[in-house]
């Protein structure tokens, strides 16, 4: 939590939060409440996405704060809330914060060389999206790195986080289906676990070696590197565990 966030939180009449678009790591709601001396009302996906208008109505005559993990404007849900609030004449102050997009900089890969981000979701019956494969293909053709965000399912009935191992298996299955020679067991990847925490783990190697590796607790993400600058090669060699 930045000092600016802390300042606004202490002035707020009421504080809401959601942790289904991103998961709170490195602390707990209770610890934050202790620092602020205020109750934080954690909302479900339904309460935010289908009943968000209630927050906007409340904000018409109260100072309402809405907390998220990471940067608030990364999730389209939060963008929509901000737009609707402005439409209703409610002032909106957006406080930026560190997110996975800045945290992956610990790999030493140059951020301006990342292309479009891919999201890998849990496959279901009759549902196996090919978008991640297509995004990786497009980025590799341009020599760009691909950040792959892994599925998070947190609601009243489920709490499930896709591991890097599961994500890599999905990529191999997509290659098996598409057969465009974009991804193989020999493709090199970087796995970042618990980015932004005090104990992150960075591992670089071939998919066949990464796929059975124990990366520990979530959250995980995968990076498929594009064309590497010599400094990026050194960064992957010295800043990551190589297997």
Image (cartoon, rainbow, N blue to C red):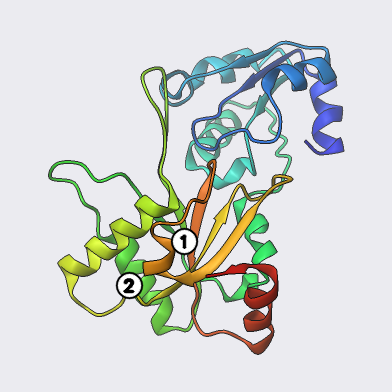
Place of residue 213 in the rendered image (x, y in percent of width and height, measured from the top left): 46, 56
Place of residue 105 in the rendered image (x, y in percent of width and height, measured from the top left): 67, 64
- In the rendered image, which quarter contains the N terminus? top right
Q: Is residue 7 above or below residue 137?
A: above
Q: Is residue 64 above or below residue 134?
A: above
Give the quarter of the image for residue 107: bottom right
Foreground of the two, 111 or 235: 235
Foreground of the two, 122 or 7: 122
Q: Residue at x 60, y 60 (%)?
A: 202
Q: CA distance from mark 1 to mark 2?
A: 21 Å
User: Which residue is disc 1 drawn over?
Assistant: 117
> How many other residues sit within 10 Å of disc 2, few (<14), some (14-19) or many (≥20)?
some
Identify the residue at the far bottom of this view: 230
Foreground of the two, 210 or 93: 210
Identify the mark nearer the N-term, 1 or 2.
1
Q: Residue at x 76, y 16 (%)?
A: 33
Q: Is residue 154 left or right of residue 122?
A: right
Q: Is residue 62 left or right of residue 57?
A: right
SS of the residue at dot 1? loop
Residue contact at pointers 1 and 2, CB within 8 angstroms: no
Q: Is residue 126 left or right of residue 130?
A: left
User: Which residue is disc 2 drawn over?
Assistant: 185
Q: Is residue 168 above or below residue 96?
A: below
Q: Residue at x 43, y 47 (%)?
A: 163
SS of the residue at dot 2? loop
Q: Residue at x 82, y 27 (%)?
A: 8
Where residue 230 is drawn, which disc sits there? Answer: none
Place of residue 180 in the rendered image (x, y in percent of width and height, measured from the top left): 22, 78
């Amino acid at each position: 939590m930045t000092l600016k966030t802390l300042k606004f939180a202490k002035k707020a009449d009421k504080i809401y939060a959601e942790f289904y678009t991103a998961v709170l790591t490195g602390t707990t709601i209770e610890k934050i409440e202790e620092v602020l001396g205020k109750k934080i009302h954690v909302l479900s996906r339904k309460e935010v996405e289908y009943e968000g208008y209630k927050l906007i109505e409340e904000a018409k005559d109260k100072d309402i704060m809405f907390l998220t993990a990471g940067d608030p404007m990364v999730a389209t849900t939060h963008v929509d809330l901000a737009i609707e609030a402005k439409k209703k004449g409610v002032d909106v102050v957006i406080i930026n914060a560190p997110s996975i997009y800045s945290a992956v900089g610990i790999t030493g890969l140059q951020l301006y060389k990342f292309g479009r981000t891919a999201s890998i979701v849990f496959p279901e019956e009759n549902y196996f999206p090919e978008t991640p494969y297509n995004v990786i293909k497009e980025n590799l053709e341009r020599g760009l790195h691909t950040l792959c965000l892994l599925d998070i399912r947190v609601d009243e009935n489920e709490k499930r986080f896709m591991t890097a191992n599961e994500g890599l298996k999905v990529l191999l299955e997509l290659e098996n289906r598409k057969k465009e020679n974009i991804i193989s067991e020999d493709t090199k990847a970087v796995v970042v676990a618990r980015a932004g925490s005090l104990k992150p783990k960075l591992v670089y190697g071939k998919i066949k070696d990464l796929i059975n590796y124990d990366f520990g607790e979530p959250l995980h993400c995968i990076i498929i590197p594009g064309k590497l600058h010599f400094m990026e090669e050194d960064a992957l060699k010295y800043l990551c565990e190589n297997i």
